[in-house]
Amino acid sequence: MTLANTLAKTPSRQRLQVDKAWGLYQEADFHVLGHLAHEKRLEKHPEPEVTYVVDRNINYSNICACGCRFCAFFRPPGHPEGYVLSREELGQKIEETLSLGGTQILMQGGHHPDLPLAFYEEMLRFIKTHYPIHIHAFSPPEIVYFSRLEGVGVSTVIQRLRAAGLDSIPGGGAEILVDEVRRRVSPNKCSSVEWLDVMEEAHRQGLRTTATMMFGHEETPRQRLEHLFALRDLQDRTGGFTAFIPWAFQPGNTAIQRASAEAPVAYLRLLAVSRLVLDNFDNIQASWVTMGPKVAQLALHFGANDFGSTMIEENVVAAAGVSFRLSIEEIRRIIEAAGFEPRQRTMAYERVVRS
């Protein structure tokens, strides 16, 4: 498929539908696909800027009754390596984040069978009482799990968490939003419809959220497109997603046997298609945490306009044996070397003035 033919078949103002998206994903020349995605990115963000956020991933617990086959981080209930962070430990992590110029924490844990919803409400109130920080927490599977444990609806769970201090919801636990895949890799986790319903309800209540995709495990390429179009349909209805973050499954120490993670070219193709399909998402985020800084730098020319988080702390991907670390200044240098101006942001993509 030549550049001229691809451009002729994909007018910038014409919405990409499933069949054409599939054709591009399967057949388009790698560099042509990157060019198309970068052009779409420049339509959204003509300014020569790439954003990033200074935050920390805090896993309040690793105890989880879900047992997803792709997860190397969790420990089952009763395991000697299981933990729940104390308030003192949590406070120390937040204080360090603030001291490094952080504006938010991303807080997630497992499906802990012994913690009531009141535990999470008290944790949120503790944070908001003591620290001026944005709380981006509790992915949809966690919220569905809280709902089941408490015997109340998802809307009530979100209302209670918001009242206690929740500011936004991360897109974790999406994996692939196709139930055939979810039944194999995460059979005890919420369904794709439940994941989408949590996000729709959060948007209805005024919470902004992110969306993710973990790909490269037991799904087909066509199912990746199903995931993207499900997100696009929801964004059409609500406009509540701030960003999309695709990342490649890391097989180390997991129960899914793969020789290696997705190659950089496969990641960049998926990223580019995501930018073209998700025309109603303002921001696409590169994943340096899973792909490394050099591939993430290339991603800035394959549709991504955001470099993601500084990841002062990250545990889940590290448990699979992948551990990239970058300082704020390293992230800024990488962005500049790619030809862009680095800009620190908040979760809502408001710019932060650096002191």
Image (spheres, rainbow, N blue to C red):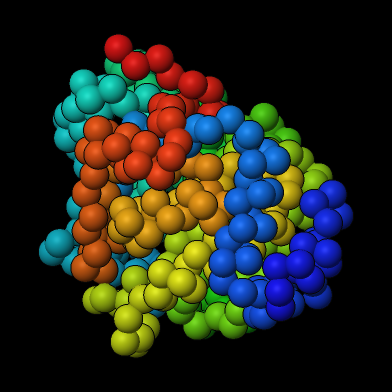
Report the residue at 65% width, 80% height from top.
26
Image x and y of residue 231, in percent: 69, 56
Quarter placement of the N terminus: bottom right
Q: Farthest residue toward the right?
A: 14
Most foreground residue, 246 or 297: 297
At x 73%, y 54%, the residue is 232
Quarter of the image where one finds residue 121: top left
Q: Quadrant of residue 242?
A: top right
Residue 257: x and y in percent read 34, 87
Question: 195 or 277, which is in the foreground?
Answer: 277
Along the line of sight, the residue nearer the viewer: 140 or 97: 97
In the picture, measured across the screen, residue 132 lies left or right of residue 160, that is left
Position of residue 76 measured from the top left corner of the image (x, y, whole percent): 28, 68
Please determine whether, in this image, residue 106 is positioned above or below residue 225: above
User: With respect to residue 355, does 57 lie above or below?
Assistant: below
Which quadrant of the view contains residue 249? bottom left
Report the quarter where the C terminus lies: top left
Question: Residue 259 at what x, y percent from top left?
Answer: 31, 87
Looking at the image, which residue sits at the far left? 80
Can residue 157 be seen here?
no
The answer to whether any part of residue 341 appears in the image is yes
Residue that appears at 54% across and 29% down: 349
Count of marks placed on residues:
0
Q: Nearer the viewer, residue 73 or 329?
A: 329
